[in-house]
Amino acid sequence: MFYRPKEGPRYEYQQQEIQRVNDAPRLIDKFPKVKSMVLELGHFGPEGATRNSHFKFTPNLDTAKAVFRINCPNQGCIRGDFDLTKSLAQSVAAHRTTVTDEMCCQGWMNKTTIDTVHCGNILRYTLKLTY
Ligand SMILES: [Zn+2]
């Protein structure tokens, strides 16, 4: 079974993030000019050397929320994860059709290294947009 803590800093953060997604507007309301969106994601270890996973994601613009959170693959990560919401908003504002970038997880490695060791996992992504 997948381990999901029911309390502690990781659980509290997850609950808070779920609430933030629930409260967000839909993509179609926030970015009415966007006709389609494809996101390609690759997770890499802290040095960016090893690729741990790669996947493609096509949100349904009519139902998806305008908060793009990608979970950090580190199961012990505290207050991390990747939020592409700002990057998406900037890309749409600039009317860009392809955006490639990377983000570093700002969370903590695990609950015993809070305030000392960062998680540092890297997400590389390509966002393709049509208007
Ligand atoms: Zn992380």
Image (cartoon, helix red, strand yellow):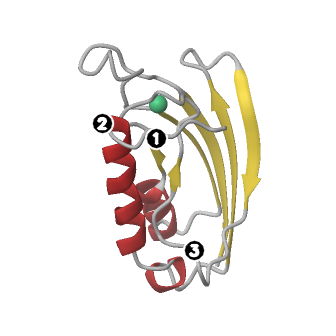
Residue identifier under label 2: 9
Q: Earlier in the sequence, mark 3 or mark 2?
A: 2
Query: What amino acid is found at the position of numbered circle 1 in the picture?
Result: Asp
Q: Earlier in the sequence, mark 2 or mark 1?
A: 2
Which disc, if any, is residue 64?
A: 3
Asked whether mark 1 lies closer than 8 Å to ligand 1, one says yes
Q: Are marks 3 and 1 in contact (CB under 8 Å)?
A: no
Q: Is residue 82 left or right of residue 47?
A: left
Residue 79 seen in the current view = no
Q: Earlier in the sequence, mark 3 or mark 1?
A: 3
Which disc, if any, is residue 81?
A: 1
Instruction: Work out whether residue 112 or residue 40 is closer to the camera in this orientation and state it.
Output: 112
Q: How far from the left and from the top, in percent, is residue 54? A: 75, 39
Task: Identify which residue is drawn at 72% across, 65% down.
Answer: 58
Query: What amino acid is found at the position of numbered circle 2 in the picture?
Result: Pro
Instruction: Work out whether residue 96 or residue 30 is closer to the camera in this orientation and state it.
Output: 30
Task: Identify which residue is drawn at 46% across, 41% down.
Answer: 81
Neighbours of disc 1 within 10 Å: few (<14), some (14-19), many (20+): many
